[in-house]
Image (cartoon, helix red, strand yellow):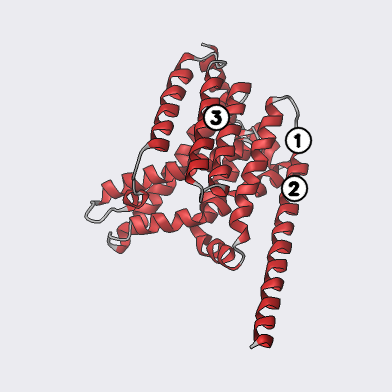
Amino acid sequence: MEFLNGLIETYSSFFSWEVLQGVLTNPANWTIILSLVILEGLLSADNALVLAVMVNHLPEKQKKRALFYGLLGAYLFRFLAIGLGVFLVKMTAIKVMGALYLLKIAADHFFGDNEKAQKAIDVLLYLGMAACLYFIPIPVVQILGGLLIVWLLYRVFKSGGDEEKETENKGKGFWKTVLAVEMMDIAFSIDSVLAAFGVSNQVWVLFLGGILGVLMMRGVAQIFLKLIERIPEFETTAFVLIALISVKMFLGAAGLHIESYLFFGVLVLTFLGTFIVHKMKKGKHGEQEVSKENVA
């Protein structure tokens, strides 16, 4: 009963004008929303192109409709996930599980070339998440969480599995393609929604950051991709930010709160650091080219 009351209270915030007004008139909330939009753009720019490939076999009018329905589905998923997540993330065990999963995302990027190390890290983090389930006082969450972790562990040890097959949709009809786009949208959303919980726990801040981020991602995916192409270090920056959000969630679980303006400051410094690293690498590369020409 407490679980249902908590959910009702959380979802009621979505329909409260006072809550929305408080979010929109607080400058600190806009720094968080901007952080979420940037994070969504960096994490999801290439996802927009994957979705475009998935609907490519449809007629031109149906392509736009399929992507539009996918967009509505992405918003609906965020509404459901944010409402449920904001309630659950108040529990220390859920915060620790979320932090461990974000750490796994970052580790997969940095250790992706070492399959054995990646598998070992994944197994350790998933087992840590499984241990956290013991401290969650909601049986339904324990059961669903346990099943999810078993499935994740199965994926770690499953051999083969060409991920590109997931995006093959040639020959599918309109509604089957829409369903495939919805499923892919949800899969893409999980990481960014979970990362958002590490930044804020206000439903409207999370929802506005999410919908603006998705809208921007769909509209300017090419810009983000060109930015990452010109400055490849930005891809690593996104995963550094995820690791930092993971640390923020761990600290939150330990009762240590980090102010939103501090996180935004870290975000700005991380971006500045990325530009500096890129310029230094570019300078070294230029010097090497000049020295080669002189030797020749």
From the image, tell me which residue sits under label 3.
Answer: 85
Inspect the image, locate mark 2, and give the three-letter code of the amino acid beneath it. Val
Nearest the eye: 51 or 10: 51
Give the distance between the C-alpha atoms of the residues marked 3 and 2, in whole angstroms.
25 Å
Give residue 205's quadrant in the image.
top right
Mark 2 vs 1, N-terminal side: 1
Residue 278 relative to residue 145: left or right: right
Residue 265 horizontal/vertical position (percent): 77, 48
The kind of residue tagged 3 is Gly
Quadrant housing the C terminus: bottom right
Q: Which mark is residue 266?
A: 2
* 99, 214: nearer the viewer: 99
Q: Which secondary structure lies at badge 1? A: loop
* Left or right: where 40 falls relative to 283: left
Amino acid marked by disc 1: Ile
Q: Residue at x 35, y 41 (%)?
A: 159
The outermost residue toward the front is 295
Q: Residues within 10 Å of mark 3 (few under 14, many from 20)?
A: many
Q: Are marks 3 and 2 in contact (CB under 8 Å)?
A: no
**Is 65 left, or right, of 291 in this rendering?**
left
- Which residue is depicted at the point 50% across and 38% down? 78
What residue do we see at 75% from left, 31% from top? 257
Residue 91 appears in view: no
Residue under numbered circle 1: 258
What is the C-alpha distance between the residues marked 3 and 1? 19 Å
- Element type at marker 3? helix
Residue at the top extreme of this rendering: 1
| Marks 3, 1: nearer the viewer | 1
Q: Residues within 10 Å of mark 2 (few under 14, many from 20)?
A: some
Q: Is residue 149 visible?
A: yes
